[in-house]
Amino acid sequence: LAALSQQEKERIDSEQTLHCLFCKKVATTKRKVLLNHMNEEHAFNLGLPDNLVYVDKFLKILKDKLERFICLYCERTFRDLTTLKDHMRKKRHRKINANNKEYDRFYIINYLDPGKGWKNIQEEVQNQDESDTDDSEEEWSDQLVHQDANVSCLFCSFTCQLNGITTHLKSHHNFDIYGLEKQFGLNIYEQIKLINYFRLKKNENICGFCSNRYNNIEELSSHTNDAHLVCGQISTKILLPDKESWNQSLYLFPVVEDDPLLCILEDESSDLISS
């Protein structure tokens, strides 16, 4: 079969230049090296290299989709690469759509055993990945959100796990981090800026709402709650600080390294262009 001859050629051929789909790595050795890199460094698994054929064409198709901001799994189109990467990270869509017949020709099993098909192999690979407990998985240089990671409050010295901090923010400070888009119409970038702005001001003992400076975090927290977060009046909608004070590019940079709060922000409604 022509497919088998092509596969054998690709196994021994080491004179080509291939680019990783997710970073700047360039492979100038065998194709297997690049495929293993994407699996190990980006948790993107196309299956065993020995099960693939016409690899160069396969990668080109995937690359073209990413350049058109198309998710490789759900195949929806997004407005830019940053939004697409964020979507694939949050939704765990770092895989291809097993129902897409366009990919059949790139799996040697379709030439040898049409009754089984590559979809079955891909599902077996995905099941193996889901049962793997290795915590070293990375996605486009982003860390997975760990629910047991300690997170500090935006307005006081309280620290606890992620689920607890979102509850604390809402019950103690009348601040619903999940409602930033719905209540205030903030897109994902504005939400990130606002969170980083509050963190930086807290570190400086400065009120993020009125810019008053306090001697310590306790004084700052008491003032913020009483004067700006209308605590004790949960039904009352808070007013955010003047947008000009926090909607600046400098606040796109995290104040807390790998801040879990930034990883749970949502902006699905405005990110999607088409289904």
Image (tube, rainbow, N blue to C red):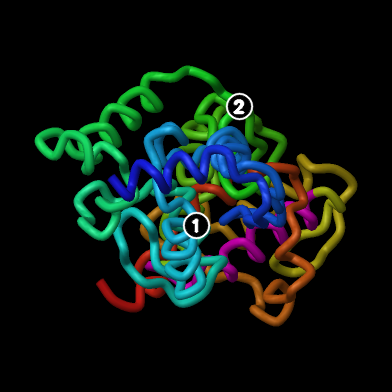
Magenta-colored segment: predominant secondary structure: helix
- What percent of the width, then of the height, locates residue 175? 51, 53
Between residues 124 and 219, which one lies in front from this camera angle? 124
Going 37% across and 64% down the picture, which residue do you hit? 268
Relative vertical location of residue 169 with respect to residue 193 in this rendering, above or below: above
Q: Is residue 101 left or right of residue 28?
A: left
Give the left or right position of residue 97, taking residue 270 as reference.
left
| Residue at 68% over, 51% down | 15
Kindly identify which numbered label has been placed on residue 56: 1
Highlighted range, magenta = 182-202
User: Could you tell me which secondary element the residue under label 1 belongs to?
Assistant: helix
In depth, the one of 133 and 265 nearer the eye is: 133
| In the image, farthest residue toward the right | 215
Instruction: Name the one closer to the observer, 217 or 75.
Output: 75
The residue depicted at 66 percent of the width and 33 percent of the height is: 158
Q: Of all residues shown, which one is farthest toward the left?
A: 115
Q: In 3D space, how far apart are the residues under numbered discs 1 and 2 (Cα atoms)?
A: 28 Å
In which image quadrant can residue 70 be found?
A: bottom left
Q: Is residue 235 magenta?
A: no
The amino acid on which the numbered mark 2 sits, given as a three-letter code, is Ser
In the image, residue 271 above or below residue 226: below
| Residue drawn at the location 73% of the way across and 53% of the way down | 254
What amino acid does circle 1 point to? Asp
Which dot, 1 or 2, sits closer to the camera? 1
x, y percent for residue 112: 21, 36
Provide residue 55's location: percent of width, then percent of height: 46, 51
Q: Which numbered marker is on residue 136?
A: 2
Residue 8 position in % (x across, y down): 46, 39
